[in-house]
Amino acid sequence: MRIALITPYGREHRNGNWHTAARWTRFLREAGHTVRVQVEWDDRPADLMLALHARRSFASIQSFAKAFPTRPLLVALTGTDLYRDIHEDRHAQQALELAHRLIVLQDHGPDELAVHLAAKTRVVYQSAPDIARTPERPNLFDVLAIGHLREEKDPFRAALATAYLPENSEIQITHFGGALSDDMADTAEMAQTKLPRWTWAGDVPHKTVLKRLSRAHLLVISSVMEGGANVICEALAADVPVLASHMPGNIGMLGEDYPGYFPVGDERHLARLLSMAEDDPGFYANLLKYGRLRRSLMRPEHEASRLRQIVAEFEQTTV
């Protein structure tokens, strides 16, 4: 099939949407499909459109539905779609109705949708290949936070948590990700001056992030809104436990019973979990155990198979 894959963010952004688009393009091409990746549809005929982000890709979604009303239209929903836009933005809402299939990235995603929409929704967990462990740095409990600095990620929660760590703690937190505003950059610069256990490394190549992840002890994800963070997949692929904010997108990835949750916006609780992970081998082992169980859902072969199955539902019906 000729597939138009629409992503609102191109390669230069190096964010989660782009990495998802790149993986899905590879999976579909390996299955024999022809895939064109675009930020906005160029009106060239396609047998199927797969659009990431209901609101941001709405112009392309609407144009394709109008040009080819009987051809399959698949829309993958991001965190801002699920937990904000579809509840208040008419374009996002219209995109849901136009889509023949909706794709969510974790098993709590359908909970946000009306019954008639949930019926046409499929779950595709994102994935990452195994990441080999490398030697850990001595006399350091290495904690990472990964993601661009923007409000939805609550990016300074881990920095604030360091103020409540015991004086003898060996925890050091490094945040990888570019600032999406001058205010965010200014706050990051100030935070690393006042909170010496936290360092902002800025926007670095993905391979550099993965190299650091391969020797890290822990990942913190503090988002207030998340559709299904690929960085969780990468952490579990590197056998790195996660401390995560207790919100639907993270619960859908890590499971209801995962022991590493802290309330959204609660740096004191996060600090307690950080200290437990550093000092309590039993707690750390439990995080590893649960993470390894969830890892089985997030392998590339499973993501590829699920995505190809959804596309295959329409291969015999395209006109």
Image (tube, rainbow, N blue to C red):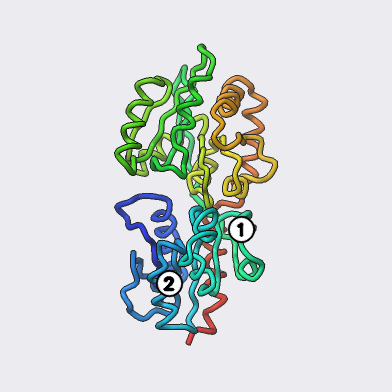
Where residue 284 appears, x then y in whole percent? 62, 28
- Figure quadrant of the N terminus: bottom left
245 vs 19, left or right, is right
* Residue 196 placement: quadrant: top left
Q: Which one is in front, 159 or 24?
A: 159
Q: Which one is in front, 209 or 154?
A: 154
Label 2 sits on residue: 61
When the figure is inspected, residue 210 is found, relative to residue 267, above or below; the finding is below
| Residue sitting at x 34%, y 32% | 201
When the figure is inspected, residue 85 is found, relative to residue 194, above or below; the finding is below
Q: Which one is in front, 242 or 197?
A: 197
Amino acid at the residue labelled 2: Ile
Where residue 221 appears, x then y in whole percent? 51, 38
Residue placed furthest toward the top? 168
Where residue 104 appears, x then y in whole percent? 55, 59
Circle on res. 112: 1
User: Separation of disc 1 and disc 2 at Cα?
Assistant: 21 Å
| Residue sitting at x 48%, y 74% | 73
* Residue 263 placement: quadrant: top right
When the figure is inspected, residue 254 is found, relative to residue 68, above or below; the finding is above
Name the secondary structure under disc 1: helix
Q: Residues within 10 Å of mark 1 (few under 14, many from 20)?
A: some
Give the mark nearest the N terminus, 1 or 2: 2
177 vs 251, left or right, is left
113 vs 48, left or right, is right
When the figure is inspected, residue 250 is found, relative to residue 40, above or below; the finding is above
> Do the residues under discs 1 and 2 have CB atoms within 8 angstroms?
no
Q: Which one is in front, 29 or 181?
A: 181
Name the secondary structure under disc 2: helix
243 vs 149, left or right, is right
Q: Residues within 10 Å of mark 2 (few under 14, many from 20)?
A: many
